[in-house]
Amino acid sequence: MKARVYVTLKPSVFDPQGQTIADALHSLGYTTVGDVRQGKFFELDLNAASADQAKSLAAEVADKLLANPVIESYRVEIL
Amino acid sequence: MSLTFAIVVFPGSNCDHDSYHAAKDVLGQDAVCIWHKETSLAGADVVILPGGFAHGDYLRTGAIARFSPIMPAVVDFAGRGGPVLGICNGFQVLLESGLLPGAMLRNRDLRFHCEQVGIRVERTDTPFTARARERQVLRMPVAHGEGNYFAPPELLRQLEDSGRVVFRYCDERGEAVDAANINGSAHNIAGICNEGRNVVGLMPHPERACEASLGSADGLLLFESVVSALVQEGAVPTR
């Protein structure tokens, strides 16, 4: 089973990388693009009996290692 | 009496020998390097988590080092009041391990900064600043891409109220102005300590500023401070 974990900076945390990318898009003429936030994406191959079990396992590793709860939040998707 | 400095070496640490040299050759104390897969600090009196790129800084700076086998011994040592200094990447490891609060973001200008900076000593009641004067300005180098200290507003208030901001980036006159804030850290914070005041982390490199021939000997103050703090206490509380 595959799980996808998306880690992003919390909305309250300034994201200089996202801001720089947004500025580049604006200078390319994409003025309709507003804010850009950059994040991280992990694809995990899991040995799990059910989607629920896979989801809780992925959330556990995200809590423990993949995301830093001080600055980041995460979202889990099971494929 | 000689103290033993234990310098933890992670895969990717690159300022370990600078710390060793400062403690052993410049200060004349005992020093040992301890590989991160060890589980004992072997009777150390002072622990240093050196600068570098522990575990390649993959994922986040310091995130994987936090789970190195030596870390439970470091947490235990810190919990018993042992003096722990985290320098640059070592500071990031202390944040990830929860020994110090907050987190590091990329420098606000997204540039890697490698230069001499000024930092102001805010507190002299830690073992690493005991011999400094309050508001003393120290010159030492920084070399980092992720030194932009972040803490949520409530935590920042707690840090300020409890006097746990130990160093702030400042100009030549000792003013903590925005122009001196090389990475965009909240409140110009360059270093903090824990509630017990025995765990100190900072982004600048005191071990690279221990001899005049390196451009500054101001960093020696941190090493001399911890020696005199432990000697004044009359012994080594943590052995």
Image: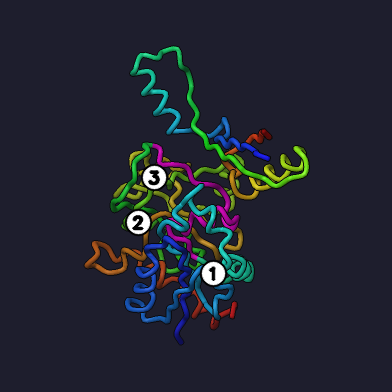
Residue drawn at point x = 40 percent, y = 58 percent:
B52
Decide which of tag 2 and tag 3 comes sooner along the chain. 2
- Disc 2 to disc 3: CB gap under 8 Å: no
Going by the numbered disc 1, the residue's amino acid type is Lys
Viewer-nearest of labels 3 and 1?
1
Q: Assign the C terminus of chain A to one quadrant of the image.
A: top right
How far is mark 2 from mark 1, CA to CA?
37 Å
Residue A46 left/right relative to B51: right
How far is mark 3 from mark 1, CA to CA?
40 Å
Residue A50 falls within the magenta-colored stretch: no
- Disc 2 to disc 1: CB gap under 8 Å: no
User: Over which residues does the magenta segment extend?
Assistant: B85-108
Give percent across and percent down for residue A30.
40, 14
SS assignment at label 2: strand
Going by the numbered disc 2, the residue's amino acid type is Val
The residue indicated by pointer 3 is B176
Residue B98 falls within the magenta-colored stretch: yes
How far is mark 2 from mark 3, CA to CA?
11 Å
Write down the chain letter for disc 2.
B
Categorize mark 2 by other alpha carbons within 10 Å: few (<14), some (14-19), many (20+): many
Write down the chain letter for disc 3.
B
Q: Nearer the viewer, residue A3 or B20?
A: A3
Confirm whether circles 2 and 3 share one chain. yes
Give percent across and percent down for residue B192.
50, 55
The residue indicated by pointer 2 is B137
- Tell which residue pokes out farthest to the left in this image: B213
Residue B52 left/right relative to A58: left
